[in-house]
Image (cartoon, rainbow, N blue to C red):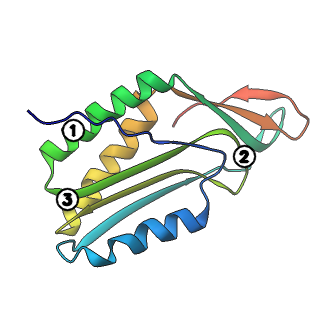
Amino acid sequence: MKERKVKNIFMEGPIPAQKIAEDIQKHATQTNIGAHSIFLGQVRADVKEAGTVTAIAYTAYTEMALEKMYEIRESLFAKYPLTCMHVYHSLGTVSAGEICLFVFVSSQHRKAAIDACEELVEAIKFQLPIWGKEILNNQSTVWKENK
């Protein structure tokens, strides 16, 4: 029977560029990989009626999100011939311009990596119980809508 390993995808604060670079570099020794598809989600300084977004404060129902992420991960590995998959999502406050989501999918060929990465990002945005409260330049807050 396969051991069920639920991975923690959450990091406090923004995802550092060094973390992204190190994760990419670690795969240089895996010569069976021919393609990586990477998605980086960055906080935008959107202009709203009430003000400009300066940051997003992320919260999650962590236990439920990790369980759902496990299910999504398993279904994508069953659907596509993937070599590996890594997901990191911020919790806490992330300022405009900083990275809040890092998705990294690898496979032998590009189509599987690209298709799985796109499907994974959509699943994260619409299936995981993660919420963002936009912090505006006037210190008011607005719940973020996923689009």
Taking 59 as reference, is 63 left or right?
left
| Residue ranking furthest to the right | 138
Marks 1 and 2 sit apart, C-alpha to C-alpha, by 35 Å
The numbered mark, 3 or 1, whose residue comes first in the sequence reads 1
* Mark 1–mark 2 CB contact (< 8 Å): no
Marks 3 and 2 sit apart, C-alpha to C-alpha, by 33 Å
Q: Position of residue 3 (x, y in %)?
A: 18, 35
Name the residue beneath numbered marker 1.
74
Secondary structure state at the residue bearing disc 1:
helix
- Amino acid bearing label 1: Glu
- Amino acid bearing label 3: Ala
The numbered mark, 1 or 2, whose residue comes first in the sequence reads 2
Q: Nearer the viewer, mark 1 or mark 2?
A: 1
Q: Nearer the viewer, mark 3 or mark 1?
A: 1
Name the residue beneath numbered marker 2.
46
Name the residue beneath numbered marker 3.
112
Q: Residue at x 40, y 62 (%)?
A: 38
Taking 44 as reference, is 67 left or right?
left
Q: Position of residue 80 (x, y in %)?
A: 15, 51
Q: Residue at x 73, y 51 (%)?
A: 96
